[in-house]
Image: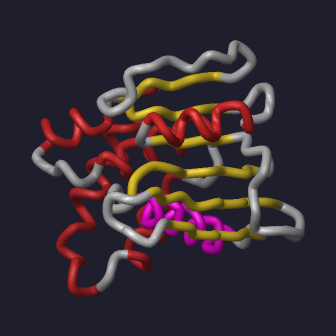
Amino acid sequence: MANYEMIIAGFGGQGLLFSGKVLAYAGLLENRELSWLPSYGPEMRGGTANCNVILSDTPVGSPIVQQPNVLMVMNTPSLDKYENDVVPGGKIFIDSSLISRKVVREDVEAYYIPATKMAQDMGVPTLANMILLGAIIANTGCVQPDTIAAALHKVIPARKADLFDVNMQAIEAGKAFVS
């Protein structure tokens, strides 16, 4: 397996930290070395938010991702901030419903997924983050597809257990969109 250093970024309230937590928990279930480091502004909802996720086969020396090989962005300021940090050959996953500009660099792979529109069309407007997560899983192989379901069962709080199926549907929609 390869090592993945990811930044997941956007506005608070978009479920970015949750997406990162699901990835990290999937890595834990696969006995990977990992780190999940959330960061958000004082506003939390509506302010900036991001998390660093590292999935590795070797011990993680620092939880801070400075040169990601995977970037997921859900707002233009995050694309502006992190695009140049992605390593050559890296992959950038963009919610094209919310970000109108294209990636400037030609040495990375960019995936434009209208995740917010897809989530609205599915009747689950708050799950654009999970659609993008599905696209990441399908195009990077960072975790095994069957591990995500087990990770979701662990990460979704018991009071929201009824949301498991719609989260899985959103992940599957993201996988199917870019496959």
Q: Residue furthest top?
A: 106
Main structural element of the magenta stretch: helix, strand or loop? helix
Closer-to-camera residue (36/9): 9
**Residue 166, above or below 108:** below
Residue 60: x and y, percent?
84, 68
Closer-to-camera residue (73/22): 73
Position of 26 with respect to 47 (left or right) is: right
Look at the image and say whether residue 155 sits in the magenta stretch: no
**Residue 46, above or below 155:** above
Point 39% across, 34% down: residue: 95
Closer-to-camera residue (101/125): 101
**Residue 21, above or below 129:** below
**Residue 52, above or below 36:** above
What colour scheme does the image use?
secondary structure
Q: Image quarter for residue 31?
A: bottom right
Q: Which residues are magenta?
A: 16-30
Look at the image and tell me whether residue 1 can be seen.
Answer: no
Residue 111: x and y, percent?
50, 25
Residue 134: x and y, percent?
44, 44
Point 29% across, 58% down: residue: 167
Look at the image and tell me whether residue 53 can be seen.
Answer: yes
Point 50% across, 17% down: residue: 102
Point 48% across, 59% down: residue: 49
Q: Residue furthest bottom?
A: 158
The mark tally for this picture is: 0
Residue 164: x and y, percent?
27, 67
